[in-house]
Amino acid sequence: MNQKNASGKKINYRKIAELSTLWMVLPSSIAVGLFMGWLLDKSLHTHPWMLGIFTVLGIIAGFRSLIRGLNKIGIEKDD
């Protein structure tokens, strides 16, 4: 459902909804990396190596997902 704003442009609510979910991609990826690294360090007694490695991997994965999501939203054509 598209409506027009004050300037006459269509408001695409689907894009707004997709953008609103992207703000959690980066923090959640980092949190998963931290947790996995902590869990592996605890079980393998390798403190702090796995924590550091998986934190970096979580940051990389988060930025990749964020960029993919932004590109997906930017590429879609308006109705």
Image: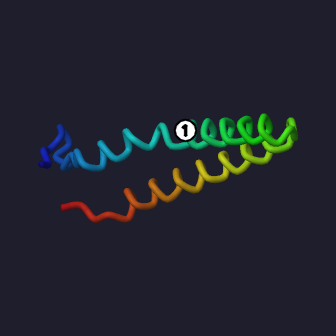
Residue 25 image offset from top left, x and y in percent: 51, 43
- Which residue is located at x 61 percent, y 36 percent? 31
The residue positioned 45% from the left and 55% from the top of the image is: 69
Mark 1 is on which residue type? Answer: Ser
Q: Residue at x 80, y 38 (%)?
A: 41
Up/down of 77 relative to 23, above or below: below
The vertical placement of 46 against 63, above or below, is above
What colour-coding does the image apply?
A: rainbow
In-image side of 55 versus 76 (left or right): right
39 sits to left or right of 24: right
Residue situated in front as seen by the camera: 59 or 43: 43
Q: Nearer the viewer, residue 56 or 75?
A: 56
Question: Could you say where residue 6 lies in the image, as x and y percent from the top left?
Answer: 17, 37
Is the C terminus in the top left, top right, bottom left or bottom right quadrant? bottom left
How far across and how far down the image is residue 72, in percent?
40, 61
Q: Is residue 12 left or right of residue 2?
A: right
Q: How many marks?
A: 1
- In percent of the image, x 86 and y 36: which residue is there? 47
Q: State which quadrant residue 77 falls in.
A: bottom left
Residue 61 position, x and y percent, is 61, 53
When the figure is inspected, residue 35 is found, relative to residue 62, above or below; the finding is above
For mark 1, does the 10 Å Cα neighbourhood hold few (<14), some (14 to 19), or many (20 or more) residues? some
Q: Which residue is mark 1?
A: 28
User: What secondary structure is found at the residue carrying circle 1?
Assistant: helix
Q: In this view, which residue lies farthest toward the front? A: 43
